[in-house]
Image: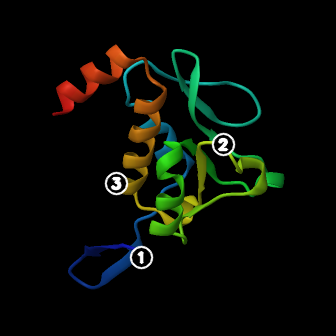
Amino acid sequence: MRRYRSTSSSRAETIFPVVADWDTVSELALSFPEAEASGGGRRAFSVRGKGFAWEARERDGGGLAVRVDREDKQLLLDANPTAYFTSPHYNGFPAIQIRLEEIDREELRERLEDAWIIQAPKKLAAAYMADAG
C-alpha cells in the first residue's frame, strides 16, 4: 500500500508519495547505537563488524538487503510483496530485499531496527530496547 503525504498551501494542495531513498536509509541505519557505514562501492551498514543492511547487487535484483529472522522471512515477503522481495542469491539466507520506492520511512525504520537488533551483541541490543521501551 502506497502512503501519501499532503502539503497544503493557500493556493493548492500537493500530494506526493512518502517513500524512502538511500539518504533515508543512511540516516535511519546510522541512528542505531554503534552503527557504522562501510566505504567502498556499495552502501553497507554494520554494528560491531556484523552487517545488518547493504545495497544488493543489481545482478541479484538490487534494492536494499536487510537481515531478518529465518522464521520471519516468508511472513515479511508475503506481508508486503510490493516492497519486499528475494532473489535466488538470497535463497536460504536470512535476508530480504526492499524496493525503496515502495516503502515508507516508518516501515523502513522498523526493518532496519529489526536487522540491527538481530546483528547487535545481545547486551547492546537489550540496552537499546530497554531505552526505547
Q: Do the residues under discs 3 and 1 have CB atoms within 8 angstroms?
A: no
Specify the amino acid type for callout 3: Glu
Nearer to me, 86 or 16: 86
**Residue 49 screen position, x and y as percent:** 58, 17
Q: Residue furthest front?
A: 71
Specify the amino acid type for callout 1: Met
Mark toward the start of the polypeptide (2 vs 3): 2
Residue, disc 3: 106
Mark toward the start of the polypeptide (1 vs 2): 1
Numbered mark located on residue 59 in the image: none
Q: Name the residue located 53 percent from the left edge and 53 percent from the top edge.
A: 73
| Above-or-below relation of 3 to 74 | below
Q: Do the residues under discs 2 and 3 have CB atoms within 8 angstroms?
A: no
Compared across the picture, whether 26 is left or right of 121 comes to right
**Residue 107 screen position, x and y as percent:** 38, 56
Compared across the picture, whether 41 is left or right of 45 comes to right
- Image quarter hosting the C terminus: top left
Label 2's element? loop
Label 3's element? helix
Numbered mark located on residue 93 in the image: 2
Q: How is the image coloured?
A: rainbow
- Image quarter hosting the N terminus: bottom left
Residue, disc 1: 1
* CA separation in Å, label 2 and label 3: 25 Å
**Residue 69 screen position, x and y as percent:** 49, 42
